[in-house]
Amino acid sequence: MEHIAIEWKTESSESKTEQVSPDGRWHLDTKVERDGVRRATLVNYDVLCSPIGMGGSQLECWRDFVDHCERLSAKLEKVKAEAAAILAGLENDKTEEQK
């Protein structure tokens, strides 16, 4: 059987870094594509899920849904405050570097 060589053409190439906070809540994925474009995605696992409502009746489902919304709202406020503090620190560090 004759060996056939394939000349590969690279359609895409990227470098990817996945970072996770020690508590596993924050995930930062960074990709640098072949054209040099950098893309980063930040996710907090505490607020990934949408509220749901479950129960034995439609009324119970709506009550449960509203309760889940309240709890998610509280989580969002906490995560937002934490993210804002981290952002302020990063912006302060950048300002200090420019001096």
Image (tube, rainbow, N blue to C red):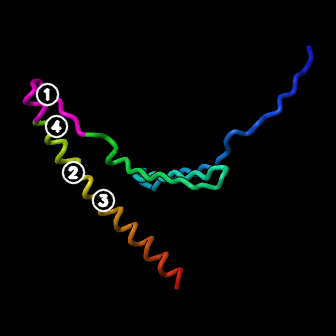
View extreme (right): residue: 2
Residue 92, relative to residue 15: is it above or below?
A: below
For marks 2 and 1, give the one nearer the viewer: 2
Of the numbered discs 2 and 1, the one sitting upstream in the chain is 1
The disc label shown at residue 80, or none: 3
Badge 4, how many Cα within 10 Å: few under 14, some, many 20+? some
Please report the bounds of the magenta region as a residue range. 51-62
Give the Cα separation between the discs numbered 4 and 3: 22 Å
Point 49% across, 81% down: residue:
96
Q: Which mark is residue 65?
A: 4
Q: Which residue is mark 1?
A: 55
Residues 77 and 8: in front is 8
In magenta stretch: residue 61: yes
Measured as percent of width and height from the top left, residue 62 is found at 12, 34
The circle drawn on residue 22 is none
Label 2–label 1 contact, CB within 8 A: no
Amino acid identity at mark 2: Ser
Q: Which picture quadrant has residue 37?
A: bottom right
Which mark lies nearer to you, 1 or 4?
A: 4
Separation of residues labelled 1 and 4 (CA atoms): 10 Å
Secondary structure, mark 2, is helix
Query: Of callouts 4 and 2, which one flags the residue occurring earlier in the amino acid sequence?
Result: 4
Tell me the residue that label 2 is attached to. 73
